[in-house]
Amino acid sequence: MSILLLAHVDTDGSLAKPALEALGAAKELAAGLSVPFDVGLVGGTADAAAVQIGSCGAAQVFGVCAPELTEARYGTDAAAAEAVARVSGADIILVPGTSRWMRVVAGVAQRLGGRVDTHVTECAAAGAEVSVTRWYYKQRIEGVLTRQERPLVLAIEPGTRAPWAGAPSAMAVTPVDVVVPAGRTRVVGVRAPASGEATVRPDAELLLVAGAGWTKKQADGAPHVADAERLILAFLAGARASLGGSKSLVDQSGDGQAVLPFMTHVNQVGQTGASPRHRKGLATCCHGEEPHVVGWRFIGERRAVNLNPNCGWAQGKADVLYVADAFEVMAKVNELLG
Ligand SMILES: Cc1cc2nc3c(=O)[nH]c(=O)nc-3n(C[C@H](O)[C@H](O)[C@H](O)COP(=O)(O)OP(=O)(O)OC[C@H]3O[C@@H](n4cnc5c(N)ncnc54)[C@H](O)[C@@H]3O)c2cc1C
């Protein structure tokens, strides 16, 4: 059995965290099966990335490099991934489950006559077999399976394991030729949602969730959206927290209502939103309904501030519920944060 870690190189020439996490998984699997593993790098250049992981213990590092591979694009990425997979002849191909690879891995597995599993959280040696643990249905169901088809492409879910860490070391790259298909898609630039980018911080200790209550009429009969904005932004800055939102709040921008301008759908937590990972979470002015709280499954300690003692958080969904006015609580918390 042979194993290949297939990673794409970032535009700055380095390998990002998800690639290092998948590298750790490949290394562990190879050790479990007592077989060597190779690394395949796809991108504009591969030399710096090869040095970055030079001490990882890979038998060989293959590089598929072309200016067209600097940017993500289905046709060029799929051709490059297929080329390196064929040269390596690997039975098991691990890739980081990034948006770039998730777009192409199914097509690549099809071209290779293999199979693909995505949202993989663990792959381990079970005798001569490889047992794969993966999520289904937006992480609600976990399955453990083995497959006989080869090659088996496994997309390792980012954030589910520690990244490989090791010293940089010189590592030769074996070039792999690929005929990059003439692309019908031209990458002319990258446009990222400015607000989401600034407030979604995956590495933060704490997630602050803002609910629709922040924009609703308060005890004096009027909404206080400007105060809400000031309090939330001050807390984010003071606590270095990441910002999540309920669907009701982020949907408001579409309804033409007064809305917090820094909240977008990128911030939405829940069944139809994200399931972020943070050690602690604080929900404010959010009711705590099941379709929202299901997105909290990877939040460790949960607290909520709500005026309603019978809100969803009180039904066993939070460790601590403060029955209080979030405007007052957050003003006090911000004062304490200085
Ligand atoms: C198929 C489906 C998928 C869905 N997916 C998602 C999803 O991914 N994410 C999601 O969030 N929702 C989702 N929903 C919607 C979800 O069911 C709720 O409607 C939504 O989460 C409610 O948002 P909210 O709690 O912010 O607003 P509300 O229900 O309006 O609650 C506002 C809360 O603010 C409190 N409040 C008001 N003022 C204050 C104050 N001054 N201090 C403290 N508390 C105050 C109120 O007591 C109230 O509890 C989904 C629904 C369906 C049917």
Image: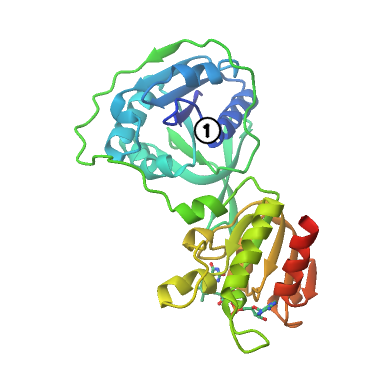
Q: Residue at x 35, y 38 (%)?
A: 72
x then y, percent, for residue 75: 27, 37
* Residue 137 seen by the camera: no
Left or right of residue 217: residue 327: right
Q: Residues within 10 Å of mark 1 (few under 14, many from 20)?
A: some
Left or right of residue 302: residue 25: left
The image shows a total of numbered marks equal to 1
x then y, percent, for residue 275: 59, 57
Way the structure is coloured: rainbow
* Residue 295 seen by the camera: yes
x then y, percent, for residue 307: 73, 81
The quarter of the image that holds ligand 1 is bottom right
* 21 or 51, nearer to the observer: 51
* 277 or 219, nearer to the observer: 219
Q: Which residue is mark 1?
A: 16
Q: Residue at x 53, y 68 (%)?
A: 260
Quadrant where the C terminus is found in the figure: bottom right
Q: Quadrant of residue 85?
A: top left
